[in-house]
């Protein structure tokens, strides 16, 4: 396993390597979950640092064990934002602490149409960039998450997740870090780090999809992966439709100057 991680690190940009290198602090090792990690520790453009232990990103949390739940309780992770669609959430309900504040941010993302196209392509890149470039559902998907961050008590922490913890969650993490003033290159490399944290899970999923559904292996690898062009497709669509990321924050997510100032005061130091 160590050699696999070292090989993966060698293929990643320097900032992504640094992001994974501090995984002893960032990665929350769970028995029933993957890619569960802290967004803290990143430097902002004005020299501040995102606070540790306040915001976490993750893949599916439906299979967390009793030991995992004890870790969540000890870290005061009692606010949960579920970025999956309704049917996904019903099929694999989150395992929640008894007092958890849970919000399902379901929005129509045309996932069914996306999945139906898989048998007719050998390259997942165009599918993924198209998926990331569709931003009309972002208000329903991400605005509640930012409202929770604004309202959340200082003694609490929040986790947001989807199924794999790399696409919808990756965009969510990118939006949070951007709102806090983290440089885009750092934001991008937090996104790219899922390639390491999900390496074994992606391998198993790829094998299953190729075997059971007869899909092209390269296409599945593209779909299960993370690439700079995917995240760029989201931010390019935001700038094209709204003129700037700041305008998008204000018009779609309800984050004007006052709200951004509040977020940065609350989650950076």
Image (cartoon, helix red, strand yellow):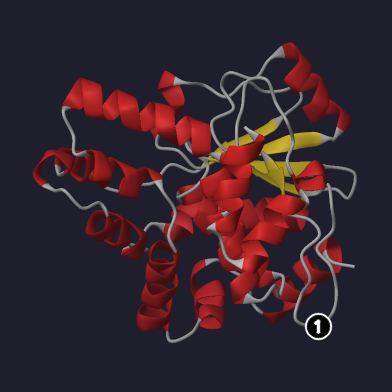
Residue 264 falls left or right of residue 16: right
Single out the residue that lies furthest toward the top.
Answer: 66
Residue at 50 percent across and 47 percent down: it is 166
Q: Position of residue 230 (x, y in %)?
A: 39, 62
43 relative to 174 in the view: left or right: right
Task: Identify the residue shown where x is 27% and y is 58%.
Answer: 125
| As drawn, 28 above or below 64 | below
Q: What is the quadrant of the N terminus in the image?
A: top right
Drawn side of residue 29 relative to residue 90, left or right? right
From the viewer's perspective, tell me whether residue 155 is left or right of residue 89: right
Considering depth in this image, is 239 or 100 the residue closer to the camera? 239
Q: Position of residue 30 (x, y in %)?
A: 70, 26
| Quadrant the C terminus occupies | bottom right
Up-down relation of residue 65 to residue 118 (above or below): above
Callout 1: helix, strand or loop? loop
Residue beneath label 1, please? 46
Q: What percent of the width, then of the height, locates residue 105?
A: 49, 43
Residue count near mark 1 (Cα–Cα under 10 Å), binned few <14, some 14–19, many ≥20: few
Residue at 51 percent across and 58 percent down: it is: 171
Q: Is residue 111 visible?
A: no
């Amino acid at each position: 396993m160590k050699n696999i991680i070292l090989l993966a690190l060698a293929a990643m940009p320097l900032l992504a390597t640094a992001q994974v290198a501090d995984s002893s602090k960032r990665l929350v090792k769970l028995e029933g979950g993957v890619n569960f990690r802290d967004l803290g520790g990143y430097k902002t453009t004005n020299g501040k640092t995102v606070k540790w232990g306040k915001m976490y990103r993750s893949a599916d949390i439906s299979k967390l064990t009793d030991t995992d739940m004890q870790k969540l309780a000890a870290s005061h992770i009692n606010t949960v934002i579920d970025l999956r669609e309704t049917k996904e959430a019903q099929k694999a309900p989150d395992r929640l602490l008894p007092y958890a504040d849970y919000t399902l941010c379901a929005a129509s993302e045309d996932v069914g149409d996306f999945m139906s196209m898989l048998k007719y392509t050998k390259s997942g890149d165009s599918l993924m960039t198209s998926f990331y470039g569709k931003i009309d559902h972002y208000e329903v998907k991400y605005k509640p998450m930012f409202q929770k961050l604004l309202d959340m008590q200082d003694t609490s922490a929040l986790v947001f997740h989807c199924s794999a913890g790399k696409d919808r969650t990756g965009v969510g993490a990118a939006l949070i870090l951007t709102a806090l003033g983290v440089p885009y290159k750092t934001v991008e490399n937090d996104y790219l780090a899922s390639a390491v944290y999900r390496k074994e899970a992606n391998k198993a999923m790829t094998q299953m999809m190729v075997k059971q559904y007869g899909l092209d292996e390269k296409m599945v690898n593209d779909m299960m992966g993370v690439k700079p062009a995917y995240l760029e497709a989201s931010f390019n669509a935001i700038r094209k439709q709204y003129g700037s990321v700041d305008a998008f924050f204000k018009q779609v997510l309800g984050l004007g100057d006052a709200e951004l100032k509040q977020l940065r005061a609350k989650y950076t130091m």
